[in-house]
Image (tube, helix red, strand yellow):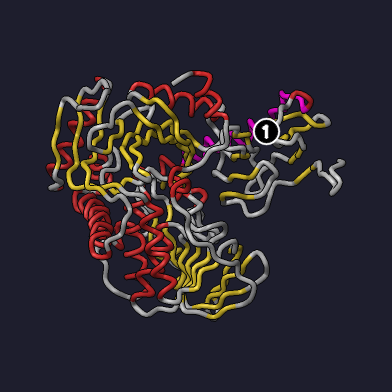
Amino acid sequence: MNQNEQADRLSEETSSIWFETVRLPSFKKLNGNLQTEAVIVGGGITGITTAYLLAKEGVKVVLIEADRLCSGTTGYTTAKITAQHTLIYDELIGHFGEEKAKLYYLANQGARDWIGQMVRTHDIHCDFREQPAVVYADKEKEVRQIEKEAEAYRKLGIPGTVTESLDLALPVKKALIMHHQAQFHPLMYLHFLIAELVKMDVSIYEETVAVEMTEAPSCVVHTKEGHQIHCSDVLICSHFPFYDKGFYFSRMYPERSYLMAVETEQPIPDGMYISAGNPKRSVRSLSCNGRAMTLVGGENHKTGRGENTANHFQKLAVFADTLGAKEIICHWSAQDYTTLDKIPYIGKLSSRHSHMYVAAGFKKWGMTSGTLAARLLADQLLERDNPYSEVFSPQRFTADPVIKRFMIDNGSIAGHLIKGKLEKGKESIKHLKNDQGAVVSLNGKRAGAYKNKEGRLTIVDTTCTHMGCEVNWNQGERTWDCPCHGSRYEATGEVIDGPAKKPLRQLYREHHTQDGEK
């Protein structure tokens, strides 16, 4: 790829290949009070699948989404349907024992099989392809990790193969293959499920933000617009629990990762590939509207703590070049939460909330985790036994490694809180170019400034409205990101991702009048 053309492409606003190739139906926002049996908060793969399963059982369901359906992590995924979550099974055996590690595998593999069965039964056109999942070591120090993971596969009865070479143009030392996995186009798949929800008279509302809940005598979801939805049960499938009565903000940590769809000189061989070590690299093929491409991902970092995000895209583009990339079709990033012990929280919100459920902390593996969460939540609400309830229970507590991880992460958060308060803006507002933002000094205090494409200026207070950390500018996404708990805001201060609920305080905003004058 020509370097100048590549730099220009990466400086453009980001867009996901999934949204570029599928148009989902739109739904109106809620404009009044409702009464129903179950309310699902969150319109990604977890919420949509949960609604589908409950509606099939005759439950009256209302699904609400703060933005547009699939506009969160679901629309920005690598779309691998796999139980191979990098190197995890040796670690799970060490912390939880073979029985629970095996249940974790069976739950995820069961979700993969369920999606495959849905595709076959309903003839869903979503580019579903069975593929092996491959985790590879490209450094000598990672070879032993691959060997230990292969031994974990053997103990748990996971079909796997070890190899010392791949057809992919990578310096592989050793690789572990998990058989019988798959990939697909997530929005094409969910387009079918959404259509089924409409047929079953499930009420769907977009741009409907849930801000509070009460549970006495029955559950009530309160929206930002002041409306109420009365129900028997609430299922929070919104990436981060908007109603955080289980201290989830301190039990999960957020990471951003970067992806790009590229056209390559030659198609990559079958398989979904991910590196064992860092920097993390993910590779898989895809076909959109008859056009063969390669999806490249990686460059993970804690939210708000990375370098200039444009640099992450640039590093990914350099990696794509090694695979023979000749054109970047589009590029985007995603945010995911990981729990302290790396197993998602799926089940009752807390021991004190018997009719409120949560699904969160999918660690970048939301296609399988979101699907298994839907099946588990549906079973729990319908009071059916599920063999995986205990493994994923949000009420679980294991001293190792949870306490150690909790102390490390929260110590780091305290450091970022103090550091942010001491830092002053280094950039000058007058030096900002159009479509550029930066932390600046305003009357001696830290502030965030952004000039839009037309040159209009907005200045915000950089103090996160969640717990008072100082947000940092993300030029790649044109957002303000909090390094403590992952809240993200639009350039003009509106909330994109929780746990924050309130926008950043605007200190100044330049407007145009109807006649074009400022």
Q: Secondary structure at mark 1?
A: loop
Label 1 sits on residue: 435
| Residue 436 covered by magenta stretch | no
| Above or below: residue 319 compared with residue 244 | above
Instruction: Label the magenta part by its dominant secondary structure.
Output: helix
Residue 174, given in percent of the width and then of the height, sits at 19, 26
Mark 1 Cα within 10 Å, few/some/many (few <14, many 20+)?
A: some
Residue placed at 55% from the left, 44% from the top?
A: 485
Quadrant in which the N terminus appears: top left
Query: Is 447 situated left or right of 188 in this image?
Result: right
Residue 474, given in percent of the width and then of the height, sits at 59, 34
Q: Residue furthest front?
A: 290
Closer to us: 345 or 65: 65
Residue 419, given in percent of the width and then of the height, sits at 63, 30
| Residue 409 covered by magenta stretch | yes
Residue placed at 34% from the left, 77% from the top?
A: 57
Closer to us: 280 or 324: 324
Residue 91 figure quarter: top left
Residue 302, given in percent of the width and then of the height, sits at 49, 36
